Image: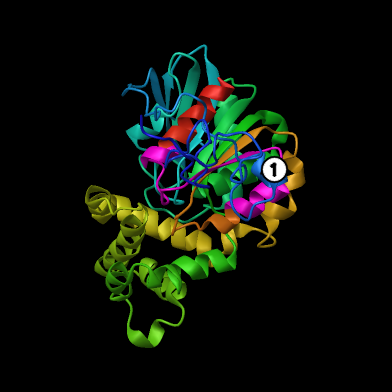
Amino acid sequence: MRQRFCLHCRASNCPEGRIPHQAVCLRAAPCPCASPRGVPLAAADTMRPFPQDRRMRTLYPEITPFDQGTLQVDDRHTLYFEQCGNPQGKPVVMLHGGPGGGCNTKMRRFHDPAKYRIVLFDQRGAGRSTPHADLTDNTTWDLVADIERLRAHLGIDRWQVFGGSWGSTLALTYAQTHPQQVTELVLRGIFLLRRWELEWFYQEGASRLFPDAWEHYIAAIPAEERHDLISAFHRRLTSTDETTRLAAAKAWSVWEGATSFLHVDEDFVTGHEDAHFALAFARIENHYFVNGGFFDAEDKLLRDAHRIADIPGVIVQGRYDVVCPMQSAWELHKAWPKAELKISPAAGHSAFESETVDALVRATDSFA
C-alpha cells in the first residue's frame, strides 16, 4: 500500500494528506503546515480549508430570466435589468466589472436558482443600458444611487451584493453607504481604486509579466506620451474622431482581456476586441480612473471599512491575479476581519477559473 504524506510538510503521518488545490493542510495541529507559511495562526483561522467534500463546484446550469425590463434613472440614462431564479427566493444583486463591462449570461449561474432571486443590471453606459458608452452623469455615486433605485423599483427590502474587480469596488461603496440594505457581501478580485493599483496595471508592473500583450497595448500611444498612459488613452478615448476612439478602446480592452486568466483564454481576448464592448469598457473605465473613482480620498474604502464591520462576507482572491493584485484583498481582510478570505492558489483575475468558481459557489451556497 502506498504511503500517504502531507505534500506541504512531507510528514508521513499526516492522515488526510494535502491535495494540490487546498489552501491549508487538513491535518489538525501540531502538523507544521497547520497554517500557511509566514501567516500567523490568528490570520490563518479565517482562511479555512476546503470542506471534506473535495469535489470542485461548478457554475449552476444555464437559466433564462423570468423578468426583463428597463429603469429610467434620470433624464439621460436608462438601465437594463433582469431577474433569474426563484421569484420568492433570497434576493441578490450582481455587480459587473469594468466599470463599463456589462453583464453576461454566466453571471446568472453563481447562485442556486431554486433558492435565490438573482438580479442583474447593466450600469450606466454599459451593456444594454443607454446611452451606450456615455460619460455624462456617470460617476460612482450615480451608480450607488442607481442600485438603490433598482432595489426600490423591485420591491426588495435587503439583498446580498455580489461583485468582482470593479464590481467589488462598487459593492463596497454601496455597502458602506447603505449597510442596512445589505445582508452579505460576496467579493472577488478586490480593487480599491488606489493610485498604485492603477499604476501597476496601466503604467508599469503587469507589463513585466506580459511584455507581449503590453507591446500591443502601448502601440496605440506615441513614445513621447507613454510616461502617463492613462492620460494619453483618455485623450484618444474622448476624441471627436470615431476611428481614434475605437483604436484606443480596442487596445485598452484587449490588454485586460489578455491578462485576466492564469492561462490566457483566447476566446476571452477575442471578446474584448468587439467594438461595441470595447468602446463602453475602455471609455467608462478610463473616465473613472482619471477621476480617482470620484472618491474624496484614495484610501476611502479601507478608511470606511468600519461601516461594514457587522456585515458577513467572503473575499475570493486569485493568488496570481495580475489585474488586481492580492495585496488589496489582504488589506481589506485586515480592515474587515468578519469577512472570510478564500485564496485560489492557482488562479488569476477571472471569476471563471475553476478554483475561483468553486470558492464563489460555495460562498453563495453558505448564505442561501
Mark 1, secondary structure of its residue: helix
Above or below, 260 relative to 224: above
Can residue 310 be seen here?
yes
Q: Position of residue 249 (x, y in %)?
A: 32, 62
Q: Residue at x 36, y 21 (%)?
A: 65
- The quarter of the rendered structure image containing the C terminus is top right
Can residue 154 be seen here?
no
Residue at the disc numbered 1: 176
Q: How many marks?
A: 1
Residue 339 within the segment the image draws in magenta: yes
Q: Nearer the viewer, residue 40 or 340?
A: 40
Residue 143 within the segment the image draws in magenta: no
Type of the residue with mark 1: Gln
In the picture, measured across the screen, residue 265 lies left or right of residue 78, that is left
Q: Position of residue 193 (x, y in %)?
A: 57, 59
Span of residues in magenta: 329-356
Q: Position of residue 169 (x, y in %)?
A: 57, 49
Q: Nearer the viewer, residue 175 or 56?
A: 56
